[in-house]
Image: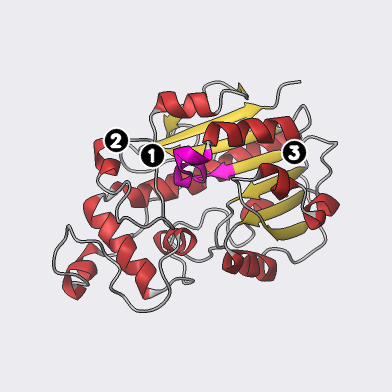
């Protein structure tokens, strides 16, 4: 089942230039008033959502000016995650899912592929009984997910950090919803590329594999290191907003504890999966937990 993505209007670079939030393009942005930017709210802005602040919009526009492909990358990521979730529900027969780094629910925007229902809306087309746990380390994201996604007993939203998989999966509320004696679909959408090397992304995937029952599947999307993305990797120097695109070889190694489903790992979009205009520096993986 393919999820189609149309490259709708992205935030205006003209507006960025006219507003001139900083004089020197090379200078670190961040002069906007209000809360410090967050990955979740910047992602929301790129998908046409409304749950973001001026600081998020300004930093996103700065990134788009230096690396316009970021907008298409975010759209392709959302489309591939929906495609993968549908594949796991329909072809692999999974009926429970954990969306780690779920981000803010987005509706009505140019990048709105799955609708406000998120992963739940996608997998319940295969079976309305599917259970979904949304997990994020941003308390604001969890509040939004509880209000807009966790509206019935088959859905929950929980605070957790991918850097500690054992604690994340041990959450009592999550364990009441997700039965870890049965196969689970875990989604890691553009989560490991905001995880520093020092936090061992390969170890994170390996720990998840060790904690999940055989027959489970893990979906990973990861930004690919290219000269274009290099322009924004590590900039601005903000430890709260790391961005670590990696090579296809590095991402393959990170996912090495999984049994990959061909043709993955693969550069996205694939013709049968999602459609955007032009190449996107995004890698997609779908793998089984061995056993």
Instruction: Identify the element where label 2 is drawn.
Output: loop
Q: Residues within 10 Å of mark 3 (few under 14, many from 20)?
A: many
Instruction: Identify the element where label 3 is drawn.
Output: loop
Find disc 1 in the rendering and name its residue: 245
Instruction: Identify the element where label 1 is drawn.
Output: loop
**Based on the displayed image, in which of its 4 quarters is residue 148 positioned?**
bottom right
**Based on the displayed image, in which of its 4 quarters is residue 257 positioned?**
top right
Q: Going from the N terminus, do you reach mark 3 or mark 2 first?
A: 3
Q: How many labels does the image show?
A: 3
- Quadrant of the frame with the C terminus: top right
Asked if residue 2 lies in the magenta stretch, the reply is: no
Find disc 3 in the rendering and name its residue: 184
Residue interval drawn in magenta: 188-199
Q: Position of residue 42 (x, y in %)?
A: 42, 61
Q: Residues within 10 Å of mark 1 (few under 14, many from 20)?
A: many
The type of colouring in the image is secondary structure
């Amino acid at each position: 089942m393919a999820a189609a993505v149309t490259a709708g209007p992205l935030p205006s670079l003209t507006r960025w230039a006219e507003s001139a939030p900083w004089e020197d393009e090379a200078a670190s942005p961040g002069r906007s008033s209000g809360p410090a930017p967050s990955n979740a709210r910047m992602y929301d802005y790129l998908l046409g959502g409304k749950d973001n602040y001026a600081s998020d919009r300004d930093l996103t526009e700065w990134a788009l000016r230096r690396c316009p492909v970021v907008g298409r990358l975010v759209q392709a990521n959302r489309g591939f995650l929906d495609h993968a979730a549908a594949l796991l529900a329909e072809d692999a027969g999974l009926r429970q899912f954990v969306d780690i780094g779920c981000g803010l629910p987005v509706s009505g925007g140019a990048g709105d592929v799955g609708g406000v229902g998120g992963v739940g809306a996608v997998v319940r087309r295969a079976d309305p009984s599917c259970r979904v746990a949304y997990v994020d380390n941003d308390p604001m994201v969890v509040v939004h997910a509880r209000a807009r996604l966790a509206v019935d007993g088959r859905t929950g939203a929980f605070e957790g950090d991918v850097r500690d998989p054992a604690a994340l999966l041990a959450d009592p509320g999550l364990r009441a919803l997700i039965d870890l004696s049965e196969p689970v679909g875990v989604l890691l959408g553009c989560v490991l590329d905001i995880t520093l090397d020092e936090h061992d992304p390969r170890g994170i995937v390996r720990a998840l594999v060790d904690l999940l029952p055989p027959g489970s599947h893990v979906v990973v999307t990861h930004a690919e290191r290219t000269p274009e993305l290099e322009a924004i990797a590590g900039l601005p120097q903000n430890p709260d907003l790391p961005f670590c695109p990696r090579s296809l070889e590095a991402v393959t190694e990170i996912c090495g504890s999984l049994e990959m489903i061909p043709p993955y790992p693969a550069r996205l979009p694939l013709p049968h999966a999602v459609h955007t205009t032009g190449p996107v520096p995004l890698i997609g993986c779908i793998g089984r937990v061995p056993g």
